[in-house]
């Protein structure tokens, strides 16, 4: 019985599964983002995150350990040279899974798995938001609130002043123009 065993076998033998996860991890490290099924992405996440943690400390032992999983020198050097410095301050959670829909042929749920620190869209937005919050602080919120109150008061004053003028502008000429418009429509 398989009670309590959480490994997703993905319908493959152990050697095939190990080779597939190794190849997918290599592609993820080289390209920083790959598209696959959700089940494979979740299995890949459990496979690659310990390797990324090992890459934070650049030692010969860690390089050999990672190489035993990936079996590709170029990928190992890419991991330790470019990926490791970017994830050095992150305490885990190096990958992000974004669901993209369903595959056309067999309706399998597809997703995109990517390295979190290499997505410029998310990292730029977060950097901008944090800098804005830190610069403005609590005092800016109060000034913005008073500024909006002043604008609301100014708009109310303008509407009150323009209302009597609108009532006095209705003259017999205006009524003649409206009657001419009615005749043109007929």
Image (cartoon, grey):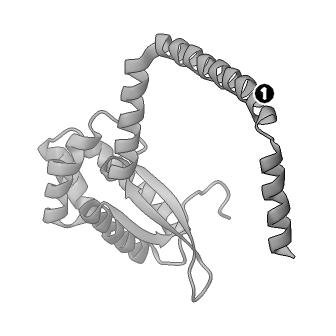
Q: Position of residue 153 (x, y in %)?
A: 66, 18
Would you identify the image quadrant in which residue 132 lies?
top left
Residue 55 versus residue 68 in the image, above or below: above
Q: In this figure, which residue is indicated by the disc labeled 1?
A: 164
Q: Nearer the viewer, residue 25 or 169?
A: 169
Residue 38 versus residue 62 in the image, above or below: below
Q: Position of residue 129 (x, y in %)?
A: 42, 33
Number of disc labels: 1
Could you say whether the residue bearing mark 1 is in a helix, strand or loop? helix
Q: Position of residue 26 (x, y in %)?
A: 28, 65
Residue at 47% from the left image edge and 77% from the top image edge: 13
Residue at 71% from the left image edge and 23% from the top image edge: 161
Would you identify the image quadrant in which residue 149 lies?
top right
Image quarter hosting the C terminus: bottom right
Q: Nearer the viewer, residue 33 or 59?
A: 33
Q: In the picture provided, is 15 more to the left or to the right than 68?
A: right
Q: In the picture provided, is 23 more to the left or to the right than 175?
A: left
Q: Can you see residue 46? A: yes
Image quarter hosting the N terminus: bottom right
Residue at 49% from the left image edge and 78% from the top image edge: 12
Crowding at dot 1, Cα within 10 Å, few <14 / some 14-19 / many 20+, comes out as few
Q: In the picture provided, is 163 more to the left or to the right than 9?
A: right
Q: Nearer the viewer, residue 109 or 135?
A: 135
Would you identify the image quadrant in which residue 66 lies?
bottom left
Q: Can you see residue 91? A: no
Residue at 21% from the left image edge and 59% from the top image edge: 67
């Amino acid at each position: 019985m398989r009670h309590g065993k959480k490994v997703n076998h993905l319908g493959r033998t152990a050697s095939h599964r190990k080779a597939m996860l190794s190849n997918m991890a290599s592609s993820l490290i080289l390209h920083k983002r790959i598209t696959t099924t959700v089940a494979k992405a979740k299995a890949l996440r459990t496979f690659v995150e310990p390797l990324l943690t090992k890459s934070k400390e650049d030692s010969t032992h860690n390089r050999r350990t990672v190489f035993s999983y990936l079996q590709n020198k170029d990928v190992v050097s890419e991991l330790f040279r470019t990926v490791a410095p970017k994830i050095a301050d992150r305490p885990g959670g190096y990958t992000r899974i974004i669901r993209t829909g369903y595959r056309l042929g067999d309706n399998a749920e597809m997703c995109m798995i990517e390295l979190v620190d290499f997505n410029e869209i998310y990292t730029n937005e977060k950097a901008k938001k944090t800098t804005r919050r830190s610069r403005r602080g609590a005092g800016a919120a109060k000034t913005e609130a008073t500024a909006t109150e002043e604008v609301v008061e100014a708009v109310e004053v303008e509407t009150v002043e323009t209302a009597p003028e609108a009532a006095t502008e209705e003259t017999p000429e205006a009524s003649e123009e409206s009657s001419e418009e009615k005749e043109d429509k007929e």
